[in-house]
Image (cartoon, coloured by chain):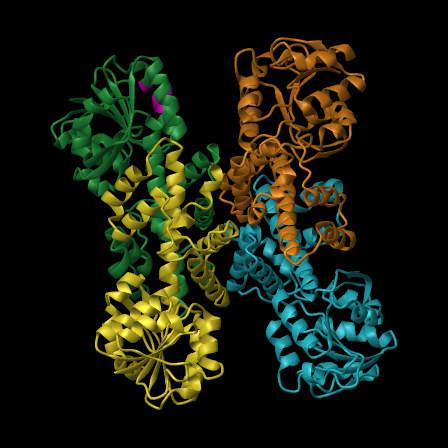
Chain colours: A green, B yellow, C orange, D cyan
């Protein structure tokens, strides 16, 4: 396939690498051109605008930090919307609001083009190894045409229907559950510590016998050790996801009291300057005050 | 061993059965004598007071619904404290406040006797099959003397030190984490449902690829299906555990904002008359209002 | 003065009436023209677009329900921005996000025009009698030129500086405090009712001796009596204000835990279909569940 | 009247002074005898036990910091319960749980004696000047017999029925409303500050035109200035009152989500070592984190 790729942050870069390694032809664009250089060595063509990464491709994948960036790249000058060819697909893998996903889907449809929301679960390492989990929603034929992309970046693809915002809502809900787990573990640690209990020993009881979840194991250890180095998922991005979940819920008048409390905790963490640490630090933001 | 057993609710009854099946000699007491009858057929002796279940035994196990009941049985008329023999151990498996655990530990120690807190994780079925998880804390020698008890009722025993309230705090923290997961899953479902997503399909994405936790699988299915039949863990008991966690945290000035929000949700659930359904119904209490 | 007026909802209509009664010349526009008819009888000229209400006036006042409406009327086709004359002022009295206020201020300034944010406190009745409280922020000279407008609609004008979003933030903060009071009163009532205390009698103790606030008296009585007729301030609008406050706080990483809980309560109220009742109903939304 | 008085903290001392100044005969007891000395100079008799302050009096007033202290003084060795004469009344002015109030009422009744709950609103200064607000509940005849006491310490007495816990619930609810106001003002300040608004100027808009409450004025100024000197109402006591309100609500399955969030904020404040500052500091505890 001939694939355009816009947005070469940590995740985007790793996904693009996987696509090249998988034998796809890549035309890449990033706001700061430097980031693209290592991909050129792997065979990618670097271009100067989203439109140039879109013209003549079978699909253009966007992986951008937020709604504003995706809106700009799609609807702005030299954007994707106007440049997309008749049989081409816009694949949006960014974590964005379901509302923007719906709007872009509508605009592409009005234009006779196809829009597929395909947010991904997993870290840059998994993306580089083609082991992401892909959650895709869009017109069935368009989703099928994109299968080679999903297979290159992911080990599992969940197709959740034809309605793009559904995939974005699933992504937000998954990240909300993880964020809640992180904060919950932190509160549990803070409680047992007051009785002289070691965090790791508590984790062994909780996860060894009961939850038995590898991800709880990994995050539980990070919070226990307070090792919030920043090469994981940045707290600021987790804050964005929880905020988007709360806003989406509010737009549908769905109460999410735990999500709301989490949102406050993320605000407090950012007020304390923790934008760039691993998001598992949310497990310490309230309880740290106790010391 | 000759073992006294006080408190034959669902859990207590199942634990007592496991002890008898394991070959121990049991003297049992329950406020309403009827509950004890099936144990008599298995060979237990039924007595009329906590004191009678305590005199002459190697250990007396208490499994009672709350602080007040354990206080009455231990310190009230014909109670355990005065009746416990010089080398005997009081094993408290109830889910109680760390504060009461500390107080009973002190009183037994002043009396020259041993108190071991040994709350258990798991359901009555697991108790009947000797597959509970035991979390024990108390004087090392006393804990060792109780090993045959723990081995009979549980498949794993975590000894967490000599300080009884520590075991109770661990129990509360574990149940708080589970309760938070239930409520969190409920909020996530409520969000994705608004986008036409099936709860079970969401659970498959969340737990199939990411969390991979058997307990999340089981509870996630219950909440998805809304099958809150009451032969599980009663919501009212979950409410009690979260309340005890919040109170213990407050006593040590540990903020637990998620636990606090959960506490409110349990209050709302009980205000809606759901004391007796399975506690996983906490996953629906706020979002049910949306319908 | 020759004044354009865009947006003739309950508040806008009442404000426009006050301006006419005060002797000002009014050119009015409303999306649905019908609403303007009674003003024509008072002497207003009705026009078909925001631009027509802007051309040749000294000031154009906008009073619209939300950010989207104000954005459309200002920046959309036949909008205010392009039509505003060199010495004219755009006075925005809507309750909107500080962010949009900042953006419109910037766009008008770039255009060589003046933008004044002048949100108002008070009900339509007060607006019709010229007794609103005006909170104004914008370039000093522009604010001064608008004095006749403020004097016509309000009994007090607080000028809070030259930065338009400041006035909007003040409006949101005031409404947040009032909303919090309503919900707080509701919780207090719910508590004392459990002890057989009459709400009105409690209010007499609270407000008669301590708070002594006329607004607490009025709202306290409404909540006590459960008389949430809809000719007051609609709950949906209160929900919007609290949401805007939370979003503004989040954008500046300011934790507002009470505002967040309030936001959830408003979501729950709207999930229960209470969009159109008086916003004091927020005092019953959680506690009603207890019955 | 011959009046016993037990508990000479800041409030108790001031109330006792007012009673003496009013011409009553006082027999006082305090755990640490030193505090009583200035009252001796005014003519009080100091005794060594609660019982001695109870024997032969018309009424014994207790003003103690918490449930535990009142329980000890009433039910402990040399306590009030056993010493109270046939026509004498136990007047409890402490801020305690409605549950303890109910229990003491029952015990006194079983004993053929009368118990009146009469918590007071106001500061030590008001107590010293006889200007408290008294909220009284108990058997009608007993309440009447205590009128001279209420008239000596207070300027208003609200009799709220014959059920003592009702008066205590009212006291808790009033203090909850005030605490919520303090925290709410703090959040509002934090929001407007981000837009360069002065706290005092905001308070003038909020309270000058709208709330018009003297107590909002006073507390609003304290929070604006950050002057949390400790000769007011100690934060730790406010924390206790909110906790008692939440517990009472929970016992009756009444959701109080704002009270719950407040409780967390008080825990955070105490975790930060602010037990002894004025409770209006609760207005800064969350927002201070933003700096």
Quarter of the rendering occupied by the C terminus of chain A: bottom left
User: Could you tell me which quadrant the N terminus of chain A lies in?
Assistant: top left
| Marker count (numbered) | 0
Q: Quadrant of residue D99?
A: bottom right
Q: Which of these two is toward me, D134 or A172?
A: D134
Residue found at the far right of this picture: D23
Residue B285 x, y percent position in the rendering: 46, 46
Q: Does the magenta-highlighted stretch encompass residue D221?
A: no
Classify D229 as above or below A260. Answer: below
- On screen, residue D83 versus residue C50, left or right, reads right
In the displayed structure, does residue B248 sit left or right of residue D256? Answer: left
Residue D236 locus on image (x, y percent): 59, 65
Quadrant of residue D10 within the rendered picture: bottom right
Q: Is residue B117 above or below residue A138?
A: below
Residue found at x 70% / y 64%: D163
Percent position of residue A213, x then y: 25, 53
Q: Position of residue A280 (x, y in %)?
A: 34, 51
| Residue shown at 54% from the left, 63% from the top | D270
Q: Residue at x 38, y 87 (%)?
A: B84
The residues colored magenta run A73-80
Say whether residue A198 is visible.
no
Q: Is residue A56 above or below residue A95?
A: above
- Nearest the viewer among A60 and C165 is A60
Front residue (pair C241, C235): C235
Examine the rendering and report whether any part of residue B76 can be seen. yes
Location of residue C169 by image quarter: top right
């Amino acid at each position: 396939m001939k694939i355009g790729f816009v947005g070469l942050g940590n995740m985007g870069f790793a996904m693009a690498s996987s696509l090249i390694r998988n034998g796809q032809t890549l035309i890449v664009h990033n706001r700061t051109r430097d980031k693209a250089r290592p991909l050129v060595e792997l065979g990618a063509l670097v271009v100067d605008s989203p439109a140039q990464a879109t013209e003549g491709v079978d699909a253009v994948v966007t992986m951008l930090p937020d709604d504003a960036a995706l809106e700009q790249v799609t609807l702005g000058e030299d954007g994707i919307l106007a440049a997309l060819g008749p049989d081409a697909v816009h694949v949006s893998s960014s974590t964005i609001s379901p509302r923007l996903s719906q709007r872009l889907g509508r605009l592409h449809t009005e234009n006779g083009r196809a829009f597929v929301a395909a947010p991904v679960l997993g870290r840059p390492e998994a993306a580089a190894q083609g082991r992401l989990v892909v959650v895709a929603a869009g017109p069935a034929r368009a989703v099928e045409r994109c299968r080679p992309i999903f297979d290159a970046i992911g080990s599992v693809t969940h197709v959740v229907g034809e309605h793009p915002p559904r995939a974005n809502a699933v992504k937000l809900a998954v990240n909300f559950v993880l964020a809640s787990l992180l904060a919950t573990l932190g509160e549990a640690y803070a409680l047992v510590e007051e009785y002289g209990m070691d965090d790791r020993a508590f984790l062994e009881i909780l996860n060894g016998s009961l939850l038995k979840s590898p991800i709880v194991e990994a995050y539980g250890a990070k919070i226990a050790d307070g090792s919030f180095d920043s090469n994981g998922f940045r707290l600021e991005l987790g804050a964005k996801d929880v905020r988007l979940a709360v806003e989406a819920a509010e737009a549908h008048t769905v109460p999410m009291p735990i999500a709301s409390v989490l949102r406050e905790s993320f605000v407090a963490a950012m007020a304390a300057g923790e934008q760039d640490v691993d998001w598992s630090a949310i497990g310490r933001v309230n309880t740290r005050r106790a010391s």
